[in-house]
Amino acid sequence: MSTATDVHVIQGERVALPVRIRDAAVASAMFAVPAGPAQSLIAYSGLEVAEPLPGRAICSLAFVRYADGDLGPYHEFAVAFLVRSPGSSGGRRKRVGAFIHWLPVNQEFTLDAGRSIWGFPKVLADMPMDLSGRIKRCAVRFGGRTAIELAVKPGLPVPAGRPGGRTAPRLDSYSCLDGVTRHIPWTVSPSGLRMRPGGAEVRLGDHPVADELRGLGLHRAAALSSSTITHLTMAFGAAEEVRS
């Protein structure tokens, strides 16, 4: 049974936590970028980028078509960075999470929900997306002004895990809005996963966010890897403020 703190009213509709996504499709790519500029870009969050290799951070680009979920159908594009989870800087195993730096969407309900419930940096954009073709494509535009275009080529099928063998993995994501950094736990369960080395093409436009990404060298960087998921379920829990 939900408590009062588990329920939010968005545009007159009740949204109970955890918010569940029952069907989504995803295409994504990961890039190694200079750690210094990446850290400067997310310094406002108070978080630190993870460096899998000295001097290199990981930037992830992803676009998602939400077909069925508690926030309705919509398109989304994410720019995220791999970060050290607060309090995990010591020890042999360091926890990491995904910091969501930029999150355009194409529907107002999810925009309001994402900003008010979790502090996700959602903005409203035009987002033509094609996940039906061999190459998956998405563009983010504001009044006809292109910010970014991403194309992801097909990879090889990744065998699914043993049915019933594991629960959906819990991941850590982080947001920062209006000076408040938050931790958001979420779980994912993918099927129809394909992966490959490289396989992504990025085109940057003249939007300010494009200039930020150009400063990381994304307009000329080769992807470390890319992936597509035909069916993804997710659940997002309550956000907690990260205190320094």
Image (cartoon, rainbow, N blue to C red):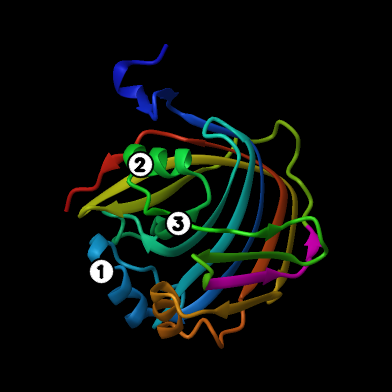
* Amino acid type, callout 2: Trp
Dot 2 crowding, Cα within 10 Å, few <14, some 14–19, many 20+: many
Kindly identify the residue that appears in the image at 38 percent across and 43 percent down: 184
Q: Are marks 3 and 2 in contact (CB under 8 Å)?
A: no
CA–CA distance between discs 1 and 2?
Answer: 19 Å
Kindly identify the residue that appears in the image at 71 percent across and 52 percent down: 229
* Amino acid type, callout 1: Ala
Kindly identify the residue that appears in the image at 69 percent across and 34 percent down: 165
Left/right placement of residue 107 relative to residue 6 reads: right
Left/right placement of residue 42 relative to residue 225 reads: left
In this picture, which residue range is highlighted in magenta? 147-157
Q: Position of residue 13 (x, y in %)?
A: 43, 23
Magenta-drawn stretch contains 153:
yes
Sequence-wise first label, 1 or 2? 1
Residue at the spot of label 2: 118
Dot 3 crowding, Cα within 10 Å, few <14, some 14–19, many 20+: many
